[in-house]
Image (cartoon, grey):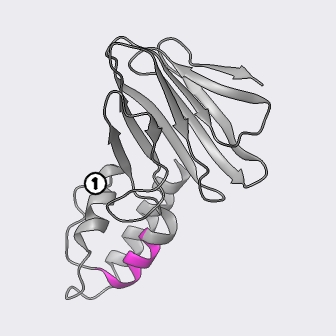
Amino acid sequence: MRKILFLSMAVLFMATSVASADLLTDDQMERLNQLGAPRAINSSFRTELGDVLDAVIGGGGRVSVAADTLAMPVVDSTNGRPVSMILKTTGSDAEAGTLADGQSGQILTIHLDIDGGGDLTVTPATSGGGFANCVLADAGDTVTWKFVGDDEGWVVLGATGVSDPVCAKS
C-alpha cells in the first residue's frame, strides 16, 4: 500500500514537471497497469518518472506458472528482474514446488490462482523463521515471502486464503 501511495504522489508530482516529449517505456506502463495505477496516466512523460518507477516498483511483476511446473521463478526470464508475484495453477495431483534463493530484500507472493485439484507444497532452498514449507490447497490461497539474505533465506511475511495456507515448522 505504501508503494502505491508513494507511486501516486510521485506520478502527480512528475506529471506537472516533466516535458511532454518524454515518454514512459512500454515496460513501465505495463508495470503501472499491474499495480492498478490511475488510467489518467498515459505516455506523455518519462525521464525522472522512469527512475522513480524502477526504484519504487522494481521487480519483474507477475509471472504465471503452469500446472506441474515445480520450480517457482524468482527472476523474470523476459527481463531479468526479480519476480514479485507468482500466479500458480496446479494439476490434479500434489505438486512439490521449489523456491530458489532470491535477492536480498526481495518480496515474493505466491498465489494459487487456479486449483486443478492438487495441493501445492512450496519448499524454499534456504528458509528462516523456523519453517520448512508452505502448503496452498485452494484457489485464493496466498503466501508472501521475503528473502532476507543468503544465511537466513526466505521468511514468511504472511499467509491467507480459503484454506489458510499452512506453513510447517522445521
Location of residue 74 in the rendering, given as x and y in whole percent from the top left corner: 49, 50
Location of residue 167 in the rendering, given as x and y in whole percent from the top left corner: 66, 22
Name the image quarter holding the C terminus: top right
- Type of residue at label 1? Asn
- The answer to which image quadrant residue 37 occupies is bottom left
What residue does disc 1 label?
Answer: 33
Query: What's the magenta bit mostly, secondary-structure-wise?
Result: helix
Location of residue 169 in the rendering, given as x and y in whole percent from the top left corner: 76, 22
Q: Would you place residue 105 above or below residue 66 in this image?
A: below
Horizontal placement of 108 versus 50: left or right?
right
Residue at 47%, 14% (x, y): give it.
137
Horizontal placement of 146 versus 62: left or right?
right
Location of residue 116 in the rendering, given as x and y in whole percent from the top left corner: 31, 16
| Count of numbered badges drawn on the protein | 1
Q: Would you place residue 10 above or below residue 20 in this image?
A: above
In terms of depth relative to the viewer, which is nearer, 129 or 42? Answer: 129
Horizontal placement of 41 versus 70: left or right?
left
In terms of depth relative to the viewer, which is nearer, 23 or 135? Answer: 135
Residue at 56%, 15% (x, y): give it.
164
Question: Quick one: label 1, few (<14), some, or many (20+) residues within 10 Å?
Answer: few
Would you say residue 57 sits in the magenta stretch? no
Residue at 46%, 59% (x, y): give it.
59
Q: Would you place residue 153 above or below residue 91 in this image?
A: below
- The answer to which image quadrant residue 27 occupies is bottom left
Q: Give, as a single range, the part of the protein colored magenta.
A: 46-53
Q: Would you place residue 17 above or below residue 54 in this image?
A: below
In terms of depth relative to the viewer, which is nearer, 39 or 70? Answer: 70
Q: Label 1's element?
A: helix
Residue at 74%, 28% (x, y): give it.
131
